[in-house]
Image (cartoon, rainbow, N blue to C red):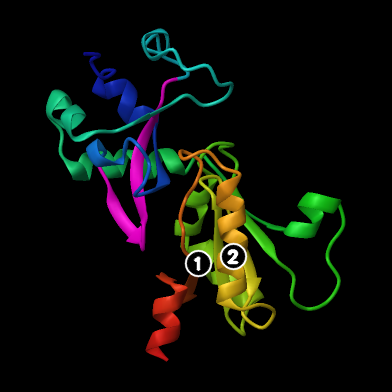
C-alpha cells in the first residue's frame, strides 16, 4: 500500500475539483456535495514530487491524486485544514468565461443569446470555476432572463439562455456528450441552473415555480 506524500508538500499543492458520484475513486475521497450528483473533492498535484514515480501517471500536465479520508489520518489533520489548503491552492488558477463560438470558431456568435464556456487555467479540473462568486454574478449579468448550466466534462460547463432551449433537449444533448467521455471525465447526468446565486438542479428549480 502506497503512503501519501508528506503533508507539507500536499498542503502547498492542493486544489479543488468537481467529480461525479459515479467516479471510481469518489467513495474513499474527502468530499462535499455541491449539487445533485456532483461533489467537491480536494486533490494534490504530484507533478513536482518524487511520488510521481510511485503512482506512474502517464499524462502530461498536472498529475492528480485525490485526497482520501485515510490520508487525513496519516497526516494527523482534519477536514478544515484540507479545505483551507485547497482554497489557497485554487487561487493560483484564473477562472474563465468565454464565448463558445470564439472558442470553437474564432469569432463571436451573432444574436443576443450567446452560449458561454466556464472553465479555468488549470487544464484539468476547470469545472471547479463555477464555484466562484464572481463567475456566478457575471453569468447572471449575461443571462438576466435565466440560464441553464450543462456539465460538459470535469473541465468545463456550458451556459445557455433559458429563452433558447428546453431542459429536455439539453438533457438529450448532455447524454450524447457523456457518451463520448470516459467515466472519469464525465461530471453529471443532470442539467443545472443558478437560483439566487446558488447551483441547483434545473428540474428541481422548475418544480418549485
Q: Label 1: state its secondary structure.
A: loop
Marked residue nearer the N-terminal end (2 or 1): 2
Name which residue lies at 55% across and 45% down: 155
105 within the magenta span: no
At label 2, counting other C-alpha atoms closer than 10 Å, the crowd grade (few under 14, some 14-19, many 20 or more) is few
Task: Name the spot of residue 120 as percent of width and height, x first.
Answer: 58, 46
The mark total stands at 2
- Name the residue that disc number 1 marks: 191
Q: Label 2: state its secondary structure.
A: helix
Task: Name the spot of residue 70 as percent of width and height, x first.
Answer: 16, 29
| Main secondary structure along the magenta-highlighted residues | strand
Residue 16, quarter of picture: top left
Name which residue lies at 39% across and 8% down: 50
Quadrant location of the C terminus?
bottom left
Task: Name the spot of residue 167 as percent of width and height, x first.
Answer: 56, 75
Residue 138 seen by the camera: no
Q: Which residues are magenta?
A: 30-46
- Name the residue that disc number 2 marks: 172
**As drawn, is 196 to the left or to the right of 117?**
left
Looking at the picture, tell me which residue is in the foreground, 166 or 82. 166
Amino acid at each position: 500500500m502506497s503512503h501519501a506524500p508528506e503533508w507539507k508538500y500536499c498542503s502547498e499543492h492542493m486544489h479543488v475539483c468537481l467529480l461525479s458520484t459515479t467516479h471510481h475513486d469518489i467513495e474513499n475521497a474527502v468530499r462535499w456535495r455541491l449539487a445533485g450528483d456532483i461533489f467537491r473533492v480536494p486533490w494534490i498535484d504530484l507533478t513536482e514530487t518524487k511520488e510521481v514515480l510511485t503512482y506512474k501517471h502517464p499524462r502530461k500536465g498536472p498529475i492528480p491524486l485525490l485526497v482520501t479520508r485515510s490520508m487525513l489520518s496519516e497526516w494527523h489533520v482534519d477536514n478544515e485544514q484540507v479545505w483551507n489548503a485547497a482554497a489557497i491552492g485554487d487561487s493560483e488558477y484564473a477562472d474563465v468565461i468565454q464565448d463558445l463560438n470564439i472558442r470553437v470558431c474564432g469569432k463571436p456568435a451573432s444574436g443576443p443569446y450567446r452560449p458561454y464556456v466556464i472553465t479555468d487555467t488549470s487544464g484539468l479540473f476547470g469545472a471547479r470555476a463555477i464555484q466562484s462568486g464572481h463567475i456566478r454574478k457575471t453569468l447572471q449579468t449575461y443571462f438576466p432572463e435565466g440560464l441553464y448550466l450543462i456539465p460538459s466534462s470535469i473541465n468545463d460547463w456550458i451556459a445557455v439562455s433559458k429563452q433558447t432551449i428546453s431542459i429536455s433537449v439539453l438533457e438529450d444533448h448532455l447524454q450524447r456528450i457523456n457518451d463520448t467521455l470516459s467515466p472519469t471525465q464525465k461530471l453529471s447526468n443532470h442539467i443545472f441552473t443558478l437560483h439566487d446565486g446558488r447551483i441547483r438542479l434545473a428540474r428541481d428549480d422548475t418544480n418549485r415555480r
